[in-house]
Amino acid sequence: MPSSLPEKRPTAQTLKILLRHYLQWSTKCNFGVFPATDQLSFLQLYRAFGFGLKEKTARRRFSASMRLLVLLLSVCPLLAAFAKPNVLLITADDLRDFGGAFTKDFVKTPHLNRLRARGTTFERAYVQYPVCNPSRSSMMAGLRAEQTGIVGNDIPLRKTMPEIVTLPQLCKDAGWQSHAFGKLYHLGGGKNAEAKQRWMDAGRSWHTAQAFEATKAGRKMLEGRDVTGGALKWCQWGAADGTDDDQPDGQIAAATVAMIEKLGDTPWFIGCGFMKPHDPFIAPKKYFDLYPPGSLKPWSDPADMTAARKESVGFGDYGEAFAKFTTQEWQELFRAYCAGTSFMDAQLGRVLDALDKHQLWENTIVVFVGDHGYHTGERQWWNKNTLFERSCRAPLIIAAPGMKGGQTTRSLAEFVDVYPTVADFCGLKMPHTAAGASLRPVLADPTASIKDAAFTLVTRGEKLHGQSIRTARWRFTRWSDGQTELYDHETDPEELHDVSAQNADVTAELTSRILKLPPVSSR
């Protein structure tokens, strides 16, 4: 380590970053001398602050000056703001984890790749209920679906847990400006504006919350059709006229960028909830042009695949409609899904550009999630709401100040870990006992692990539910009527062959773990 470094004038942004890290460290060392190693080495801070002094002298003077700044926090709100990192929570709707980089080479997502270069990609992150409202409610509360009682899209979180302190509310109540654009919670309420605001939890989670709709130009399609012949009205696709901002996701990106610029140095928590690639599978035509007709091959189930029970996948009107799809119809839907993914990715790029422009990366925690996985033909299913890997595993990327970028981890993570992770980086105490844990150790070391299993729930009416446990090797699913499924990911990553009969000991062990979960209830 060199004894001195070139002089460099510290900027306000540098001071803000250093103060925040010092506050985190000071709780460990009782406001003593800076520890030389932690999330950032002292040398990195020394270079960033750059007084051109000998290391020992710089260390002593820096610790003394920072202790003075900490003292001033009690009387100076402006300095207190320095210690608060921004939080940007970005959600994508129905975005599956294609594997590895979330999107295989054929899906064009350059801006997701940009974000991955800035943060840590979790290749094995699992939701607690693979449907929009239950998953989002679980993540925002930091509790399992068994605990929230939300198992469908018809009940808002506040109806079952009126006093719960949600993740954005935690920051809002601690002094962050909190604003939501698009779909962060499930967008219920129909056309009633007041009901929509309640579903979005405006006033509790957010200072403001705004939903968006396509313009007249955005709704007019150059081509499009319902591939189920009207049986499933949502199952339609189309290449739309107009610009990106004629569609909700374009408007959501624009509003998010505008708020980032408006808030300036004020600490903020912004929720940016993109609505694609969720159905209807409509996106501007230029994104369809990225995928020429016939260029994409949908999944084809192998003939020797173990058949799943009807309640597991293929249930109801959906299963009947999907079973009638032709190869061409699978191709049409898959092309539209990929186009919607690329459209969402382009809007993500606009938000990332704002972080670049205003040099916010070193003081902003960015969390990108998909609200659950999605089948695009596997087991003849085109939806979520199953306990297979394709439905339970979802995208998760976290970029945090002081943490190395471009990392990929195969350590298990759950979406209930998002709340305690953000609280950890913000220096906030959890207001209730979370079901998850902070992922900070994994961000610091992608080979580290904070858990050995992830859990997911689905219900099939009031009389039947299934709970699934995913370990490093196994996926085991137990239904409330006693039926079980077991898949070995070492030899069968697509979960094609149920091996529960050949592994009674594994089945017994994992059953005992599921039975320790909170009881299932639909409040």
Image: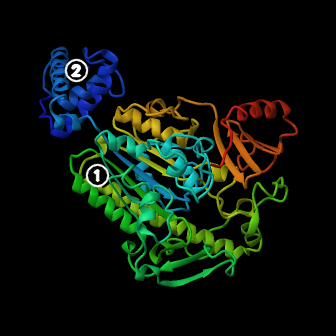
According to the picture, the residue beneath numbered tag 2 turns out to be 2
Q: Position of residue 58 (x, y in %)?
A: 16, 19
Would you say 510 lies left or right of 187 here? right
Residue name at image x 43 percent, y 31 percent: 444
Residue 1 appears in the figure: yes
Disc 1 element: helix
Looking at the rendered image, the disc whose residue lies closer to the viewer, 1 or 2, is: 1
> Is 97 located above or below residue 412 in the figure?
below
Residue name at image x 69 percent, y 31 percent: 516
Would you say 429 lies left or right of 127 here? left
> Is 506 located above or below residue 271 in the figure?
above
Query: CA–CA distance between discs 1 and 2?
Result: 31 Å
Residue name at image x 30 percent, y 18 percent: 36
The three-letter amino acid code for the residue at tag 1 is Asp
Q: Position of residue 102 (x, y in %)?
A: 54, 52
First-in-chain label (1 vs 2): 2
The three-letter amino acid code for the residue at tag 2 is Pro
Disc 2 element: loop
Considering depth in this image, is 107 or 249 the residue closer to the camera?
A: 249
Quarter of the image for residue 249 reads bottom left
Query: From the image, which quarter does the N terminus lie in?
Result: top left
Q: Position of residue 338 (x, y in %)?
A: 55, 66
> Crowdedness of circle 1 by 10 Å Cα count: few (<14), some, many (20+)?
few
According to the picture, the residue beneath numbered tag 1 turns out to be 356
Residue name at image x 63 percent, y 76 percent: 233
Quarter of the image for residue 344 reads bottom left
Q: Position of residue 351 (x, y in %)?
A: 34, 57
Residue 395 appears in the figure: no
Considering depth in this image, is 133 or 414 the residue closer to the camera?
A: 133
